[in-house]
Image: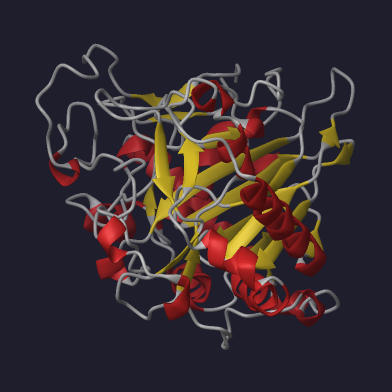
């Protein structure tokens, strides 16, 4: 199938900004098939932010883990698909395709949910695994590596359906960019990684420093490997926090202050600012009062075009030091892994950071390194974290939404 062809491409005839604003859960169905629009990026609720003095000085529990806990114990963090699970998943994917249901209309819990989960994508075996996994992602170690997804046997369409079918049992699909992609593609498309004010690094071969994505859970399915590099690192934020408080308390303090400006790289709706101001590390707004992170160093370093005009302050030496210390601490404590073809990594964005090494592709005509990406929302009233954000209880909180750009599920990078 040709690169860029879509599973479902919602109609493009709708103006993206001329309609009157509507609530995200009452979005027009002629644009958003499930009636739910991705909420998008928002500044935090500043009144709900807590000072460093109210943060725990040491975190305990299952979210605090060390790489030594897992390096030589893959059985603790991998789940090889059984033949029965693959058969179940394949049957569900085939039936879903045969139903003619729009892939962009899948939603975990909406008016379509009962039909979708119970009839169009039943997973009696895997459903139990995914229910336990969801709890572990939210409240436990925060990651899993599935092995043996038949991506090399199924082809692009069935692979996309099967992968997104898994994801629906964990959360709501989010738009990942200004083009409305709910199925993302981590693949080099020739963009210049030095142009960080307008280029998303996942579309290049460049290193991705430790960061989080704009969704509660991120999923990555490996379809093709790189010739060299492109390896994955993850780290417990709560272990990083404990280490920072002990070794660099001034850095930990600075990371909790709402003095950090994050670029939106032009992916903004009408009337919105080109940046947000927020802390990097938060406490939940109620809930279990847990430490939460929202971070990507590329998004603070790409604001020079605005700081040069005096629109936002430039990073201070103290902020530069804090960002460097956060990265170095995460590197020191991280668990390293290599994703093989057919591996699916699911990672919490609430209490884990993840990174990727720089990579080099095989020369043509070999396929380029290619991961399929999902951003999933787990709203507060469905067991998700209580975020100090205005959309904490929305079904599709977070993500990137530009006006009424419709959701799309491309089968390849575009």
Q: Position of residue 230 (x, y in %)?
A: 80, 43
Name the residue nearer the viewer: 51 or 275.
51
Q: Position of residue 84 (x, y in %)?
A: 60, 66
Tell me where residue 343 sits by quadrant: bottom right
Please tell me whether residue 31 is drawn above or below residue 57 in the rendered image.
above
From the image, which quarter does the C terminus lie in? top right
Name the residue nearer the viewer: 132 or 142.
142
Please tell me whether residue 258 is drawn above or below residue 256 in the rendered image.
above
Q: Is residue 414 left or right of residue 355?
A: left
From the image, which quarter does the N terminus lie in? top right
Name the residue nearer the viewer: 329 or 216.
329
> Residue at position x 68%, y 20% from top?
189
Q: Is residue 73 left or right of residue 4?
A: right
**Quick check: can you spot residue 64?**
yes
> Residue at position x 19%, y 42% from top?
24
**Quick check: can you spot residue 343?**
no
Q: Position of residue 280 (x, y in %)?
A: 51, 56
Q: Is residue 41 left or right of residue 139?
A: left
Q: Position of residue 235 (x, y in %)?
A: 69, 66
Please tell me whether residue 394 is drawn above or below residue 302 in the rendered image.
below
């Amino acid at each position: 199938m040709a690169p860029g062809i879509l599973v479902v491409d919602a109609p493009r005839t709708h103006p993206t900004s001329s309609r009157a604003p509507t609530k995200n859960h009452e979005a027009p169905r002629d644009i958003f098939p499930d009636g739910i629009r991705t909420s998008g990026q928002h500044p935090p609720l500043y009144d709900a932010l807590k000072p460093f003095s109210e943060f725990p000085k040491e975190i305990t529990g299952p979210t605090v883990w060390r790489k030594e806990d897992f390096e030589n114990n893959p059985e603790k963090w991998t789940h090889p698909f059984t033949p029965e699970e693959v058969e179940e998943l394949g049957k569900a994917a085939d039936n879903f395709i045969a139903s003619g249901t729009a892939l962009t209309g899948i939603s975990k819990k909406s008016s379509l949910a009962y039909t979708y989960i119970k009839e169009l994508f039943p997973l009696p075996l895997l459903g139990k695994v995914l229910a336990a996994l969801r709890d572990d992602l939210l409240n436990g170690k925060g990651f899993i590596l599935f092995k043996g997804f038949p991506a090399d046997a199924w082809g692009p369409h069935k692979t996309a359906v099967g992968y997104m079918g898994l994801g629906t049992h964990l959360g709501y699909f989010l738009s990942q960019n200004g083009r409305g992609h709910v199925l993302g593609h981590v693949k080099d498309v020739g963009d210049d990684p030095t142009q960080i004010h307008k280029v998303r690094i996942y579309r290049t071969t460049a290193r991705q420093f430790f960061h989080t994505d704009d969704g509660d859970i991120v999923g990555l399915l490996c379809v093709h490997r790189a010739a060299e590099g492109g390896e994955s690192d993850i780290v417990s934020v709560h272990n990083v926090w404990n280490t920072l408080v002990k070794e660099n308390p001034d850095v930990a303090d600075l990371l909790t202050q709402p003095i950090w400006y994050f670029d939106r790289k032009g992916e903004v709706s009408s009337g919105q600012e080109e940046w947000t101001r927020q802390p990097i590390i938060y406490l939940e707004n109620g809930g279990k009062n847990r430490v939460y992170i929202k971070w990507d160093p590329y998004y603070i370093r790409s604001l020079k075009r605005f700081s040069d005009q005096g629109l936002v302050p430039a990073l201070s030496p103290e902020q530069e030091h804090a960002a460097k210390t956060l990265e170095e601490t995460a590197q020191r404590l991280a668990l390293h892994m290599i994703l093989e073809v057919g591996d699916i990594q699911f990672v919490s964005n609430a209490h884990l950071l993840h990174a990727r090494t720089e990579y080099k592709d095989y020369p043509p005509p070999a396929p380029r390194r290619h991961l399929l990406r999902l951003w999933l929302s787990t709203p507060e009233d469905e067991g998700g974290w209580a975020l100090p954000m205005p959309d904490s209880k929305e079904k599709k909180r977070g993500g990137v939404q530009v006006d009424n750009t419709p959701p799309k599920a491309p089968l390849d990078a575009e």
